[in-house]
Amino acid sequence: MRHNAVMLELAILGFLHDAPLHGYELRKRIAALTGHVKPVAESTLYPAIKRLEKAGLLARRTRPGVGAAPRHVLTLTAEGRAELRRRLAQPADIDITDENRWFTVLAFLRHLDDPSAQAEVLERRMAFLRQPSSFFYEGDRPLRAEEVEDPFRRGILTIARATSQAELSWLRRTLHTLRAAADD
């Protein structure tokens, strides 16, 4: 299955873990989380819902509409909750390294009940962020902002470094809290 479909399914499972929703409301919530990257089309969302429903991860219930046709409300099954936890505990490498995919994992990581398991996922992200990288290279060597003359490329590198430093700081604090909770 394509990586985008996997992330869409994760978002569906995550939002339905929060509360039962009808398709339109689910689409709005997914768009708020990921729509700045790529809007969620009905032609993508509804086939994903059908796949998850066919797999027994979602259930559809019909409720009377308010002055309109009946609404189909989606709920997460026990199997769907277990699948969400499995996907959160074992995200693919691309889900850790791609910022937009990472945000989707992070948005629902609280549904993984075990603080140690949450910490393992965060530690993978921290290890990734600690690796030397850049958007620009000289041969195989990553360039730092101070080494780039182009002010726009320097801006990209400066913003990326600040974002990474902020995230690393948050990760350290959160990991400390999770480890303390796991020790209790």
Image (cartoon, rainbow, N blue to C red):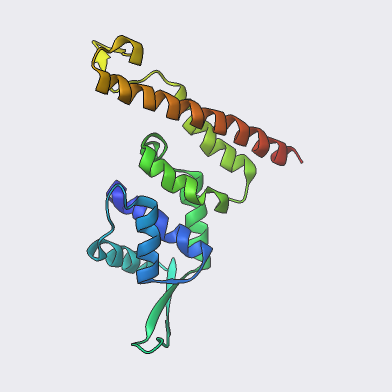
- The structure residue drawn at horizontal position 41% and vertical position 54%, both measured from the top left corner, is 10
Up the image or down, 39 lies above or below 22; here it is: above
Q: In percent of the image, x 52 and y 63: which residue is there? A: 18
Seen at 46% across and 61% down, the residue is 15
Count of labels shown? 0
23 versus 34 height, above or below: below
**Quadrant in the picture for residue 143:** top left
Front-most of residues 87 and 136: 136
User: 160 or 150: nearer the eye?
Assistant: 150
Image quadrant in which you'd find residue 8:
bottom left
> Would you place residue 125 above or below residue 141 in this image?
below
| Residue 174 percent across, percent down from the top left | 61, 36
User: Residue extending furthest right?
Assistant: 184
Percent across and percent down for residue 5 are 30, 53
The C terminus sits in image quarter:
top right
Q: Position of residue 131 (x, y in %)?
A: 42, 21
Indicate left or right for 184 with 110 as reference: right
- Res. 128 visible in picture: no
What residue lies at 37% left-to-right and 22% top-to-bottom?
158
Residue 68 lies, in percent from the top left, at 34, 88
Establish if 3 lies above or below 156: below
- The answer to whether residue 7 is seen in the rendering is yes
